Image (spheres, rainbow, N blue to C red):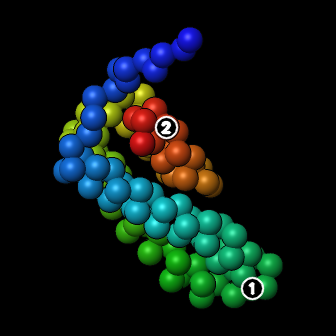
Amino acid sequence: MLQAQPSSLPALTKKQIFALKKLTIMGYLEGTSFLLLLGIAMLLKYILGMPEAVSYVGPLHGILFVAYIIVLIITASKIKMPLWALPAGVLGSFLPLGPFIFDYVLKKRLGK
């Protein structure tokens, strides 16, 4: 009969879980703004000749990108992320859908 093996991952405290939730929210906001910039604003600019959308979505995405990186660094120090997680989170922020995939993989590896 198979027995459940004890998890080798330490349980996260409430503060660590809260930090992880903040990272998830920031990642979703940053990822969504990037998709809006690429999928809507850039199309409006280059296909329909309407550059106004980029002038609004672009700076918003820039602010959210910087905020995401800051929250990622703070969260990495609070929950003692695996060594690969910080560079993967930064790399993911440069790719469409990257923050969403990073969040999924990180939570899976942390057992959440």
SS state under label 1: loop
Front of the two marks 2 and 1: 2
Instruction: Tell me if 105 is positioned left or right of 48 in this view.
Output: left
Q: Is residue 10 above or below residue 44?
A: above
Amino acid at dot 1: Gly
Which residue sits furthest top? 1
Which label's residue is closer to the chain start, 2 or 1? 1
Q: Quadrant of residue 41?
A: bottom right
Q: Is residue 74 visible?
A: no
Q: Is residue 68 above or below residue 51?
A: above
Q: Quadrant of residue 52?
A: bottom right
Sort mark 1 into few (<14), some (14-19) or many (20+) by Cα contacts within 10 Å: few
Q: Residue at x 51, y 73 (%)?
A: 58
Q: Residue at x 48, y 47 (%)?
A: 103
- Between 31 and 47, which is closer to the camera in this rendering? 31
Q: Is residue 23 visible?
A: yes
Quadrant position of the N terminus in the picture: top right
- Between 44 and 76, which is closer to the camera in this rendering? 76
- Between 80 and 46, which is closer to the camera in this rendering? 80
Instruction: Tell me if 16 is positioned left or right of 43 in this view.
Output: left
Quadrant position of the C terminus in the picture: top left
Residue 57, x across and y down, in percent: 52, 78
SS state under label 2: helix
Which numbered tag is attached to residue 49? 1
Amino acid at dot 2: Lys
The residues bearing labels 2 and 1 have C-alpha atoms spaced at a distance of 43 Å
Q: Residue at x 38, y 23 (%)?
A: 7
Q: Is residue 7 above or below residue 71?
A: above
Sort mark 2 into few (<14), some (14-19) or many (20+) by Cα contacts within 10 Å: few
- Between 22 and 43, which is closer to the camera in this rendering? 22
Residue on which disc 2 sits:
108
Q: Quadrant of residue 34?
A: bottom right
